[in-house]
């Protein structure tokens, strides 16, 4: 397990405001006490009302803004985990389609719900974002040119109450990892609000036991 640079995460979160929003799509599912899907949604982020955008930006931002290397830890997908039909392939496909494939999202919700048991209702929020990573001059000042476009997913799992009112994220992830100001598709940053992670170091087991 490698260390996450706090500066990388702060750079991302600065693009998670109403004026500098980096998200184009939000999707998710409401899960019942037994881990079954109780309803889903899939919307263009910019079509949400400003108040809704702010609520969801706060949810998404909580993942990269959390305590690096304590609440947010980086894991690598080893070659065996990048096989056909695995979680890595599913996440790559969701990133590439920009969350526009409901069938693939349903696969994730069902698989996640079958393993994540809390005995209470919760919601899975997915965000798709793009960040034009600016070049840095030798004095660390940003230049206008873009070095690369970092396309990414943020997933946040939140308890819900009342009429699907979300609480603070209790788990989630950022994929791909944003490492040294660049995309690393072989790594994922996994979030646990309490900082307690399963003993297993296999990404699939950690992810589905959050």
Image (spheres, rainbow, N blue to C red):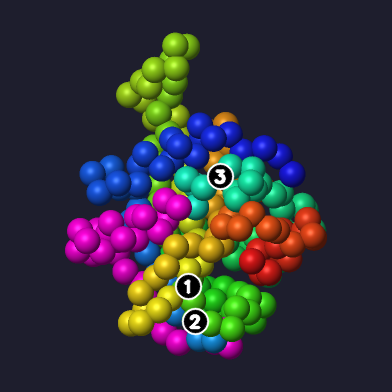
Residue 87 appears in the rendering: no
Q: Which residues are magenta?
A: 34-62
Residue 152: % across, % down: 48, 51
**Residue at the (70%, 58%) spot, across then down:** 197
Q: Is residue 46 magenta?
A: yes
**Mark 3 or mark 2: whose residue is earlier in sequence:** 3
- Quick check: marks 3 and 1 in contact, CB under 8 Å? no
Decide: is 108 above or below 140.
below
Residue 7: % across, % down: 51, 32
Number of the label disc, if any, that sits on residue 121: 2
Name the one closer to the observer, 136 or 210: 210
Work out how far the residue at label 3 is from the one at label 2, CA to CA, in angstroms. 25 Å
The image quadrant of residue 2 is top right
Number of the label disc, if any, that sits on residue 159: 1
The C terminus lies in quadrant: bottom right
Number of the label disc, if any, that sits on residue 67: 3
Secondary element type, mark 3: loop
**Mark 2 or mark 1: whose residue is earlier in sequence:** 2
Q: Is residue 31 magenta?
A: no
Number of the label disc, if any, that sits on residue 133: none
**Mark 3 or mark 1: whose residue is earlier in sequence:** 3
């Amino acid at each position: 397990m490698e260390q996450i640079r706090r500066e990388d995460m702060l750079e991302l979160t600065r693009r998670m405001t109403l004026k500098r929003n980096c998200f184009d799509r939000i999707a998710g599912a409401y899960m019942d006490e037994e881990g079954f899907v109780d309803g889903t949604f899939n919307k263009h982020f910019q079509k949400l009302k400003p108040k809704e955008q702010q609520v969801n930006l706060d949810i998404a931002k909580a993942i990269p803004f959390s305590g690096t290397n304590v609440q947010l830890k980086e894991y690598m997908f080893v070659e065996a985990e990048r096989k056909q039909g695995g979680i890595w392939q599913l996440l790559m496909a969701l990133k590439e389609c920009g969350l526009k494939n409901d069938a693939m999202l349903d696969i994730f919700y069902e698989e996640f719900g079958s393993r994540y048991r809390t005995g209470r209702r919760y919601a899975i929020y997915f965000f798709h974002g793009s960040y034009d990573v600016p070049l840095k001059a030798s004095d660390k000042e940003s230049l206008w040119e873009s070095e690369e476009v970092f396309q990414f997913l943020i997933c946040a799992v939140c308890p819900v109450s009342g009429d699907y009112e979300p609480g603070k994220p209790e788990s989630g992830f950022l994929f791909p990892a944003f490492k040294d100001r660049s995309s690393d598709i072989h790594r994922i940053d996994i979030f646990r609000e309490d900082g307690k992670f399963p003993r297993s170091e296999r990404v699939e087991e950690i992810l589905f036991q959050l």
